Image (cartoon, rainbow, N blue to C red):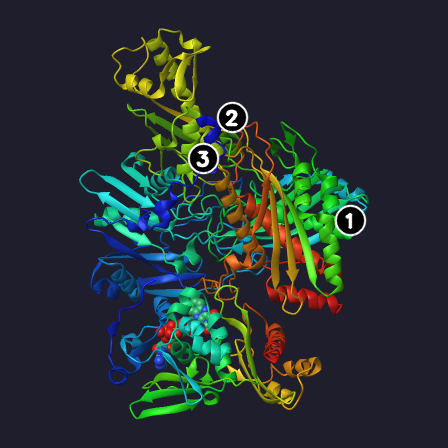
Amino acid sequence: MYPAQFDYHTPGTVKEALDLLGKYKDDAKLLAGGHSLLPAMKFRLARPAHLVDLRKVPGLAGIKEEGGSLVIGAMTTHWAVESSPLVKAKCPVLAQTAAQIGDPMVRNMGTIGGSLSHADPAADYPATIIALNAEMVVEGPKGKRTIKVDDFFKSLMTTAVGPDEILTEVRVPVCGANVGCAYMKFPHPASRFAVVGVAAALTVEGGKVSKASIGITGAGTKAVRAKGVEAALLGKALDAATIQAAAEKAPDGVDVQADLQGSVEYKTHLLKVFAKRAIEAAAKK
Amino acid sequence: MATARLMGSSIKRREDPRFITGKGNYTDDLKLPGMTYAAFVRSEHANARIRGIDTARARAHPGVVAIFTGKDMTGVNSLPCGWLLPELKVPQHPPLATEAARCVGDPVAIVIAESQTAALDAADLVKVDWDVLPSVTSTARAATPGAPQIHEVAPNNIAFKFQIGDAAETDAAFTKADVVVKKRIVNQRLVANAMEPRACVARYEDATGDLTLWVTSQNPHVHRLLMTAFVLGIPEHKVRVIAPDVGGGFGSKIFLYNEETVCSWATRQIKRPIRWTSDRREAFQTDAQGRDHVTDAEVALSKDGTMLGLRVKTTANLGAYLSTFAPAVPTFLYATLLNGVYAFGAIHAEVTGVFTNTTPVDAYRGAGRPEAAYLLERMVDACAAALKMDPAELRKKNFIPKFDNGYQTKVALMYDSGNYGPCFDTLLQMLDYKKFRADQAAARAQGRLLGVGFSTYIEACSIAPSKVVGALGAQAGLWESGKVRVHPTGKVTVFTGSHSHGQGHETTFAQLAADQLGIPMDDVDIVHGDTGIVPFGMGTYGSRSASVGGTAILMSINKIKEKGKRIAAHLLEASPGDMDYANGQFFVKGSPEKAVPFGTVALVAYVPHNFPEGVEPGLEETSFYDPSNFCFPFGAHACVVEVDPDTGHVKILRYLAVDDVGNVINPMIVDGMVHGGIAQGVGQALWEGAVYDDTSGQLITGSMMDYALPKADGLPMYETARTVTPTPVNPLGIKGAGETGTIASTPAVVNAVVDALSGLGVDHFEAMPLTPERVWKAVQAATSGK
Ligand SMILES: Cc1cc2nc3c(=O)[nH]c(=O)nc-3n(C[C@H](O)[C@H](O)[C@H](O)COP(=O)(O)OP(=O)(O)OC[C@H]3O[C@@H](n4cnc5c(N)ncnc54)[C@H](O)[C@@H]3O)c2cc1C
């Protein structure tokens, strides 16, 4: 499978990359790890005339801690996140999520920025990013702006990143000592994408949930925050009945889609099962 | 000494270093001066008439050498069907569709260019004016009233109606029955997915009129014969077909396909070599697919569990055209296996072959036999449930008793030898069946769902006696050739008509030859896959290489030994009748010190200064072996699973296999065959399935992202063992091991899942794969009383 013809650009700075986007507009596509874009191009479902490769732009990859957040460069690979001692120490669920993406080849090539920008409805990161209340930093012709995760995923494979913008950083608040987090997924038997994935971040104070943040991916057309589940947990002790009742709310607000992996009925059910599992796992930490 | 060492020992495969270091020589690796590259324009519709094809823009694309449509291919015939059942409806199958496309992926034009990318880009520019018609892909719906009609020659989309067994005897058995168990069993369609996609390079040499075709083939001579004699009408001797390293086939590379036929025709037009390599999407759409049966089966039983009768009605989906051996698969490779290892009182089976707007279906690993084994083993478990009998006991009660030479089944076949009880007992011991049932009960008490599934199977392999298959409709003989060339230095080249595309012939046949000749294995090379240098051979499928191809080699070795004895006797001034051969030495019987080494005899054969009267120089022999019967490997497998009641996910905890494949040349290779086969069969049970949209006719599972192949993390470590019942059919005692795992494992897994859910009231799954959703829904339906 060979893609249609395209021109290939290797900008050396974000500014150069932005200029290329400005110049070629709809004919241009950013290339990160290529593990979503290139398959689409090989199927000739995507036919960009210009590829703007971000891999030669210095400073876009890397993980550091800054002002209470992990700052992860958009070009940081899934493997780098999965294996980072910093991530494992400060935000283990993110490493846990990265480790469940695809297979080692995919994780060595794919990037966090590419995954979030692509916004595949079955991608893993979005659920965790929602649960962790991350912020996305984008740069465009008019400079930098920051997008809250709740404003980030717009619709099927569409994000708040403009066509003339580049996602440069993901800022993830460090998980405190009293925060328990987990990501649980039901993988697609072929691709390993999430048929259903639920991430939970729970802050427990005095035996009660003082903050609950739940992200859901897979079942619908985009990743969403499970507000019903969060509300059902807030202020409660994490006993079995509470968890069960909260998990029942997981499908609320998810536009569940039927496909070969499951009917609406089945995926709705899975959402509850995996919400429960994610909450239980988070509660143990 | 050498004899004891080579046969039956797990020698590492000599072909592996080149494969695992990327030094294999595959068709796509071939570089020829002046090479051009082909891309096919294919139908994106399942059923559509061609109003016109506009190639003007494509022709103008830089780098395009030529574009041909079906209309250009005058004088070229339909792709042939090599197995003609009585009253079979054989529709035209032009290499490039001219009037209409009958399935998605049907090729309508070839674009040939200076580069692969130019060919693909130009193919995108070919515009076909389609008149899209309604289509049908569903097996069950194909022959129902109102279904779109696919071929004029086949009213109601029916290709054939076939029956076997005794209807009256079977009716009588059902009249006598205390209990009748009836189930619908769907054996879903599978995609073969060989690792190397199909490919070909066709080169016509203007100066000599010779055509060479390199092609991913399991049987290069068959490819050549079909293509030259039936389709292109070029003289067979002017065509050389080479199947170099081939990365897997599973049956899908047996058949003559459109692409190599069109390239072989087109190279004669443009007088330049042409290469075509399928991409994975084309492979999903165009490689012949497997299985696809819908069956209603009934078993008649007496109260004590005796199996009185079996009645089977199967609809087999053949796809849009008749692929090369398609009609044989759901008939003579399926219905004849419905006796299994059980002493049924009577059997009657009807099979209806139907056309649909889907990729053609043909032999896929096991070919018919997995469908038969699945049906039987599912039915046996359903019978056990109906009778409230233990499934192991019911099996044992009905096994055909031990026989050494011949058991006449109710469905035409005559089994060679069998001893099914001990094989099954070995399995039960390995499993520790009693303990498992105790563990299962304990687990159930905690809400955990454990299950065990058995399957016993029989396979008809080492295909096949030519006379028999000829009477059944085969348009070919199914013997094999083996030529042994001893060089003057005593080194040996063996030419086999069978073909290795993963099986390990270069190792096993060298083991066999070196063992028989008592010479080092390093002195023996195996050559296969080239009609220019190998005698006509029938190729590899139906687990026939070792038993049929190996026997042909053995026959030639025996001839070499006989000739060698005459030469050695002459040198020793002894009588040829007094000579013997062992450990690489010709010697006088009873006087081993009076000996001539193999190498000396070889040299003398080529430097015949002192040579026996009336003996020809040289040391080279060719043999053709036509087996007198099929061989019938058998075995018993068990699978232990745990089902997650919340999600329906099935986890395999243990997998046990006891197989009897007759004598074994290389146990490691046989183990590998069994392991891979099990994985493939588990794939059918749990993950794989070609799904077509019945409205649009599109293959929905058309990529690796959608079609789930088995992965290592879904499979346990296998626990395997063997019993050995040599076949009397061939002198090697080898039955065949290529397909056993695939045949046995699917029912073992499904039976295990049903067993796990039996406590909830689940007794059957109509359809596979057992996706989590199917399992979960079965649990829901059973527990909510739906
Ligand atoms: C076999 C396979 C299995 C997979 N399994 C999983 C899985 O289980 N879970 C999962 O989550 N994912 C899975 N993926 C997807 C994988 O994680 C991809 O790597 C990821 O979705 C995209 O990241 P990328 O870096 O490869 O982006 P690319 O493919 O290079 O780009 C994707 C899209 O994002 C745009 N883009 C990239 N970077 C930026 C940026 N910085 N700013 C703005 N736009 C940008 C591109 O223009 C393009 O449109 C799988 C992929 C494959 C091939």
The quadrant of the picture occupied by the N terminus of chain A is bottom left
Q: Percent x, y for residue A99?
A: 47, 70
The amino acid on which the numbered mark 3 sits, given as a three-letter code, is Ala
Question: In terms of secondary structure, where does tag 3 sit?
Answer: loop
Residue B25 position (above or below residue A29): above
Label 2: element kind: loop
Q: State the residue position of label 1.
A: B389
Q: How many marks?
A: 3
Q: Nearer the viewer, mark 1 or mark 3?
A: 1
- Residue B272 vs B6, above or below: the answer is below
Q: What residue type is disc 1 on?
A: Met
Observer able to see residue B119: yes
Image: B154 above or below B414: below
Q: Chain of mark 2?
A: B
Direction from residue A172 to residue A1 in the image, left or right: left
Residue B470 pos. (x, y %): 50, 33
Residue corresponding to mark 2: B731
Asked whether residue A257 is in view, the answer is no
Give the residue at mark 3: B476
- Position of A68 compared to B208: left or right? right
Q: Residue furthest left?
A: B207
Mark toward the start of the polypeptide (2 vs 3): 3
Determine the quadrant in which ligand 1 lies: bottom left
Query: Are discs 2 and 3 both within one chain?
Result: yes
Give the distance between the C-alpha atoms of the residues marked 2 and 3, in whole angstroms: 24 Å
